[in-house]
């Protein structure tokens, strides 16, 4: 077995069965190994940020790592923003980077870069193989890192000469992923805090899983605490039968208005909330230190901590479930409300909604609260261009579930190559583009800063209208059947049609 085969075989043995790849010459031995070693499916992505976004979507849904295979430093750099989003989502990813042959590096060939430095900004550990026979051990170490605290993206750099050298029979035994733990002292302190004044549980990570939400709902029922969720959560189970936490608003003044009345805010899988940007005269933190009570971080056993807290406060089995029903189908022109309501009214039970809809999707969270049970994924790290890749990965993790990618146009334009992978792999993804033909959020931010009349250059920096993006042509060019609509009635008709079909579809919802 050569080094590349040992790497793939070791990863397969640890349960990694999917490789999102954009390879080059330095990764070819690993590509060849995909044919030689059974058990690893190779999925070609036409941009590295689609590969890393797909690994994020896959990891969030499968709750185990996928592998990314990227080409040297420049390939890794192309995938960095979605690795950043994955880091913020605490998603496990095994990131494998090919490198020049060890003996060739000192000549400084054109593609040579400092891969460790590039990877270091998103990965807590970066490993480099030194011997072919050590590759199996190196990959096992990297896989172990994907379930460790302090960062779950592990990068392994593998020089080309080591990939083709004889590695003997050095295949690693399966790497057991570490089970997360929680701090029982935090549970005791949280239970005491819940007795002192008005409290809220701020939920993120696995705190927004079905089990996490159920425990949180039971605690709320027993103690009178309210439930709040992160603004940009990684994954949340939502809809009929579940508790419906209030979502922390995006703008800090609104977020502070929500948090201010509480004496205690318990952090369960969420960080202490921080304003998205620093605005003059506005604090960075959206809770005070006195309010903030840590229960469990996103990398801890959040469900275990919530369950222990439920016991500690003597919670019963009952909890308040979301009230109401999905919205009625709207009629008339398309805007953020009508698009959001059409999706919320028609989304099927068990759907996965990848929501990178920004201002176009603001009404969607409330509108979908009482939808049939579904999984809601969001852009976590603010680095736009995540949705189409993450939807691709989610569809590969859950082939029996319908994936709906509710996508704003500006963000979508970063990751259009994902449509090709969706077409090639026949993935069941319906993309709805909220086509307002602008970077609308930038105008909203300017308005809030009191700049109502930006100059013509500044205005042009937020306009996507000259020329406008023709999403039907874009997606059809990548192999995805597509249609454009400009009324709520037509959106509903086309959405129903797309939901009834198998395979990828795109609907451009024109909102101008
Ligand atoms: C990687 C990255 N580049 C740039 C930005 C800055 N940015 C944030 S939102 C945005 C425009 C989003 O426009 P669109 O997706 O059309 O959503 P809309 O505001 O129209 O709802 C930009 C450029 C960012 N957050 N991340
Ligand atoms: Mg837009």
Image (cartoon, rainbow, N blue to C red):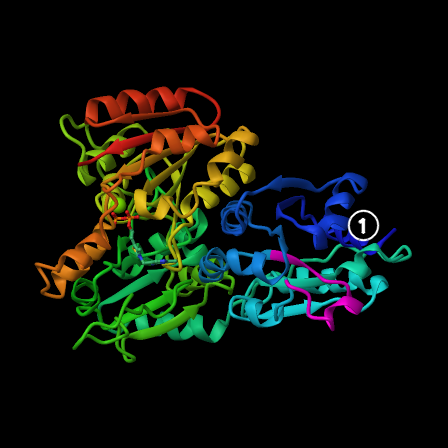
Question: Which quadrant of the rendered structure holds the C terminus?
Answer: top left
Question: Measured from the top left, where is residue 461 in percent x and y?
Answer: 24, 55
Tell me where residue 45 sits by quadrant: top right
Q: Say left or right for 135 vs 305.
A: right
Question: Measured from the top left, where is residue 198 in percent x and y?
Answer: 22, 68
Identify the residue shown where x is 75% and y is 64%: 138
- Specify whether residue 326 is in view: no
Please state which of residues 10 and 179 is positioned toward the viewer in this rendering.
10
Instruction: Estimate how packed mark 1 is, as few (under 14), some (14 to 19) or many (20 or more) residues with alpha carbons within 10 Å.
Output: many
- Specify whether residue 336 is in view: yes
Please state which of residues 264 and 463 is positioned toward the viewer in this rendering.
463
Tell me where residue 199 sits by quadrant: bottom left
Q: In what quadrant does ligand 1 lie? A: bottom left
Question: Does the numbered disc 1 mark a residue whose Cβ is under 8 Å from ligand 1?
Answer: no
**Residue 99 belongs to the span the image colors magenta:** yes
Identify the residue shown where x is 28% and y is 20%: 493
Q: Say left or right for 336 vs 471.
A: left
Identify the residue shown where x is 83% and y is 55%: 164
**Residue 406 belongs to the span the image colors magenta:** no
Please state which of residues 225 and 373 is positioned toward the viewer in this rendering.
373
Question: Measured from the top left, where is residue 282 in percent x and y?
Answer: 19, 74
Identify the residue shown where x is 54% and y is 28%: 426
Q: Identify the residue under disc 1.
A: 5
**Stretch in magenta:** 94-110
Question: Measured from the top left, where is residue 231 in percent x and y?
Answer: 30, 57
């Amino acid at each position: 077995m050569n080094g590349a085969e040992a790497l793939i075989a070791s990863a397969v043995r640890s349960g990694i069965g999917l490789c999102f790849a954009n390879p080059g010459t330095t990764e070819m031995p690993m590509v060849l190994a995909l044919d030689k070693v059974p058990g690893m499916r190779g999925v070609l992505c036409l941009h590295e940020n689609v590969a890393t976004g797909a690994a994020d979507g896959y990891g969030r849904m499968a709750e185990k790592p996928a592998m990314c295979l990227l080409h040297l430093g420049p390939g890794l750099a192309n995938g960095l923003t979605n690795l950043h989003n994955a880091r913020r989502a605490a998603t496990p990813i095994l990131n494998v980077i090919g490198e020049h042959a060890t003996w060739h590096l000192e000549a400084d060939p054109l593609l040579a870069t400092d891969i460790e430095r590039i990877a270091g900004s998103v990965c807590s550990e970066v490993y480099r193989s030194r011997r072919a026979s050590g590759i199996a051990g190196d990959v096992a170490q990297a896989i172990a890192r994907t379930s460790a605290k302090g960062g779950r993206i592990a990068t392994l750099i593998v020089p080309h000469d080591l990939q083709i050298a004889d590695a003997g029979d050095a295949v690693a035994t399966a790497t057991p992923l570490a089970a997360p733990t929680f701090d029982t002292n935090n549970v005791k302190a949280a239970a005491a805090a819940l007795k002192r004044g008005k409290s809220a549980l701020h939920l993120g990570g696995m705190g927004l899983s079905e089990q996490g939400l159920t425990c949180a709902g039971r605690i709320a029922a027993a103690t009178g605490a309210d439930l709040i969720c992160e603004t940009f959560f990684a994954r949340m189970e939502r809809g009929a039968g579940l508790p419906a936490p209030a979502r922390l608003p995006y703008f800090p003044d609104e977020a502070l208005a929500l948090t201010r009345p509480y004496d205690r805010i318990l952090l369960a899988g969420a960080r202490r909330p921080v304003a998205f940007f620093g605005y003059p005269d506005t604090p960075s933190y959206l809770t005070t230190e006195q309010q903030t009570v840590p229960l469990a971080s996103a990398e801890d056993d959040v469900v275990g901590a919530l369950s222990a807290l439920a016991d500690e406060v003597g919670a019963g089995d009952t909890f308040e479930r979301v009230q109401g029903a999905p919205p009625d189908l709207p009629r008339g022109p398309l805007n953020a409300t009508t698009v959001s309501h059409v999706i919320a009214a028609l989304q099927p039970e068990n759907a996965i909604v990848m929501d990178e809809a920004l201002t176009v999707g603001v009404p969607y969270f409330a509108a979908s609260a009482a939808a049939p049970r579904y999984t809601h994924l969001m852009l976590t790290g603010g680095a736009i261009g995540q949705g189409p890749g993450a939807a691709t990965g989610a569809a590969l993790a859950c082939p029996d579930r319908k994936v709906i990618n509710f996508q704003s146009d500006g963000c979508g334009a970063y990751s259009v190559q994902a449509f090709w992978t969706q077409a090639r792999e026949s993935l069941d993804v319906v993309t709805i583009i909220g086509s307002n033909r602008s970077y609308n959020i930038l105008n909203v931010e300017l308005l809030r800063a009191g700049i109502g009349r930006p100059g013509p250059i500044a205005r042009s920096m937020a306009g996507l209208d000259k020329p406008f993006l023709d999403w039907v042509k874009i997606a059809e060019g990548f192999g995805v059947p597509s249609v454009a609509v400009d009324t709520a009635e037509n959106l509903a008709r086309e959405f129903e049609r797309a939901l009834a079909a198998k395979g990828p579809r795109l609907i451009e919802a024109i909102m101008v």
